[in-house]
Amino acid sequence: MIKVFNTLSRSKEIFKPLKKGEVSIYCCGVTPYNAPHIGNARPFVTWDMIRRFFAKSGYKVRYIQNFTDVDDKIIKTANEQGVTWKDIAEKNIAIYFKSMDALNVRRADFYPKVSETMDDIIKMIQTLVDKGFAYVLDNGDVFYSVEANKAYGKLSGRKLSDMLAGARVEVNEKKRNPMDFALWKSAKPGEPSWESPWGAGRPGWHIECSAMSLKYLGEKFDFHGGGSDLIFPHHENEIAQSQAAIGDENSFAQYWLHNGFITIGSEKASKSDKAMVKATKGFFTVEEVLASYPGEVVRLFLLQTHYRNPLEFNRERLDEAQNFYGKLAKAYWQLDELARLIHAGEFIKDTGEKNFAITVSKAGGLVEEGERLLSNFYAAMSDDFNSALAITHMFELAKEVNGYYGEFIGGKILPVTIDGDIILRVRDIYLEMAEILGIFEQPVPVEKVEKTSDEPELVDSLMKIILELRQDARAMKNWTLADKIRDELKAAGIVVEDTPQGAVWKKI
């Protein structure tokens, strides 16, 4: 049973798919007027994790994410740079894909663009006009009439009367109500335009996502999502115009999920670009973050906090995520090494039993713990996609693996024949968790995941002292002490090799 927090009901609900065994998702994509920033990345990493979880749980997932490639900011940027709006959009869409690829965000099934959905947008606007939910001004502008929809405000929980009381004076005095929003904007000099029944122009922001989601997912689909800043007015307006056009108040998205803000010194990462750039001194775009941290570390950072909670963005938190990732990666490498060593047969004690009770062996205890933690992992993900809790269960397994590995390398465990298969099962469990979280899918150098300020220098200094003590023991022919130091280091995951130039060490 999967439970999700539905913004529409403001409560946690049991997920009931519209079609058995299938999940349909629409996530509001970027407006590509510049390179994606870290605030943009959070919803896409979140939804990528959610669709991975559904797929791993046996669902067939259809995931749609749009590009709003016709927008005021894109047009403004294009005019400032002396290029076309399409040049700006395509350039930043390419940067978007590069950034998301680095974060292991899998490609959507389809990426509709506003510029390629114009006929559907115009058709939907005409339906709203015909049904009396929209009106046309003399200059060709078309507005949605909020007063024509009695349920307006149901997503955000706002009352129209309260919104009117706080509404600012509108520049366009021809609007019937200050809260009415544009469906179609008449053509202006220096702007792209398309022909329509109301004259040349371009669509308003909200109608674009409605038309694209309905085109690719149908009149009813399971999930609609995005950042919390989209609840009002964007998603509120989407619901109003979509259900009005369809003629069914229960149509359109059934579950609305919204991720919390990324904050930088109390500034919302999805709002004020200038404030964020100032707060971060340029440490702002995904590309800039990736210049200092591996993509999988940034992804883990984003998932270590529940998607609905706010997330403070700073270097200290990223450093913590990097060190945490290093510990998870270490267990991954240890499982690979264990599988290799055990299957090589060098350490195997052949019992002659092929169905040896797994509880008798240390590996048996490890896999039992792994199965328990995998169950807990899925339980966490089934409770409103709680990746923060799920990650803790994966970390518990990493600690268990680390302990087993230390004993194995130290010679305290002599594996039996069946242990090879058991370790492979533990590895599969660990990778199943990793696949849902979206990590261990790209190579990351060890030095990139063991980034602490003074730990490398401290380890080097301590190892120098230890090796000198061992060398003193050897010089005094105290072979017992020298071998004990070597064996204890091996048990801790450090191998000492004696060379003509002296003893050297390395991590296993």
Image (spheres, helix red, strand yellow):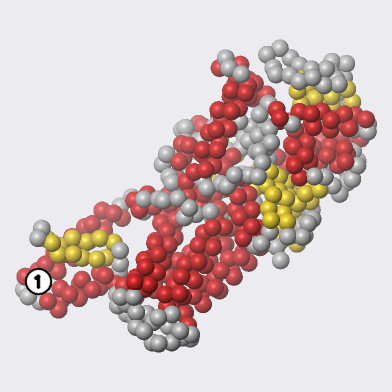
Q: Which part of the image, by quadrant, shows the C terminus?
A: bottom left
Placement of 356 over or under 473, stated as above or below = below
- Is any atom of residue 199 visible in this view? yes
Picture residue at 14% right of the left edge, 69% below the top: 470
Q: Quadrant of residue 143?
A: top right
Total count of labels:
1
Placement of 71 over or under 21, stated as above or below = above
- Is any atom of residue 171 visible in this view? no
Relative image position of residue 4 (x, y in whole percent): 71, 57
Q: In the current view of this chain or complex, which residue is farthest to the left? A: 476
Relative image position of residue 134 (x, y in whole percent): 88, 29
* Amino acid type, label 1: Arg
Picture residue at 46% right of the left edge, 75% below the top: 422
| Front-lying residue, 81 or 211 | 211
Determine which residue is flagged by label 1: 474
Placement of 446 over or under 85, stated as above or below = below
Q: Secondary structure at mark 1?
A: helix
| Front-lying residue, 503 or 229 | 503
Picture residue at 40% right of the left edge, 64% below the top: 336
| Front-lying residue, 365 or 470 | 365
Placement of 88 over or under 331, stated as above or below = above
Q: Quadrant of residue 437?
A: bottom right
- Mark 1, residues whose alpha carbon is within 10 Å: few (<14), some, or many (≥20)? some
Q: Which part of the image, by quadrant, shows the N terminus?
A: bottom right
> Image check: 256 left or right of 444?
right
Relative image position of residue 62 (x, y in whole percent): 69, 49
> Image check: 327 left or right of 130?
left
Relative image position of residue 498 (x, y in whole percent): 14, 64
